[in-house]
Image (cartoon, rainbow, N blue to C red):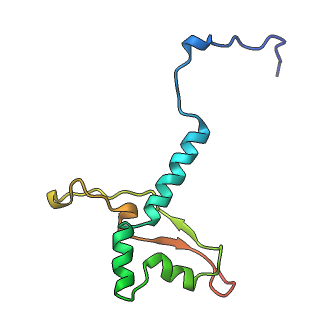
Amino acid sequence: MSTTENPPPRAAADTLVARPSLRSLAEDLRERRERAKLGGGPERIERQHQQDKLTARERLALLIDEGTFVELGIHGRPHFSQRAMEGKDAPADGVVTGYGKVDGRL
């Protein structure tokens, strides 16, 4: 393997293509995750609570050891084939999946 003493030439500032930074992409991902965690939205969560019910994530929080739940598929989106569902959002396809420890066991 050989090394070169001269680094490759850099592109001029005016020729660079504007791309989102890694930080802005990570922030966008965090925002999407938080929206998905709201499921159907604050109104639906409140409706569950008014019926003395917990959301799926709240029930999981009671079951799974704190800090051990790893959610899978939170960024998934459904592929609607019915016209009635077009334009509607169903974060994670309305399903919460993942794994975590219960009483210290995985």
Foreground pick, 86 / 3: 86
Compared to 90, does 97 lie above or below? below
Q: Give the total number of marks visible in the rendering.
A: 0
Closest to the observer, 63 or 55: 55
Return the x and y of residue 59 as percentages of the image width and height. Answer: 49, 83
Q: Nearer the viewer, residue 23 or 69?
A: 23
Assign the C terminus to one quadrant of the image: bottom right
Q: With respect to residue 1, does 56 lie above or below?
A: below
Residue 55 on image: x %, y %: 43, 79
Identify which residue is drawn at 44% across, 71% down: 96
40 horizontally vs 104: left or right = left
Residue drawn at 83 percent across, 18 percent down: 2
65 displayed left or right of 61: right
Where residue 56 appears, as percent x and y from the top left, is 44, 78
Q: Where residue 5 appears, x then y in whole percent?
A: 84, 12
Residue toward you, 74 or 44: 44
Q: Is residue 47 left or right of residue 14?
A: left
Question: For the point 67% across and 13% down, which residue is it?
Answer: 10
Among the 4 quarters of the image, the one containing residue 86: bottom left
Q: In the rendered image, which quarter contains the N terminus? A: top right
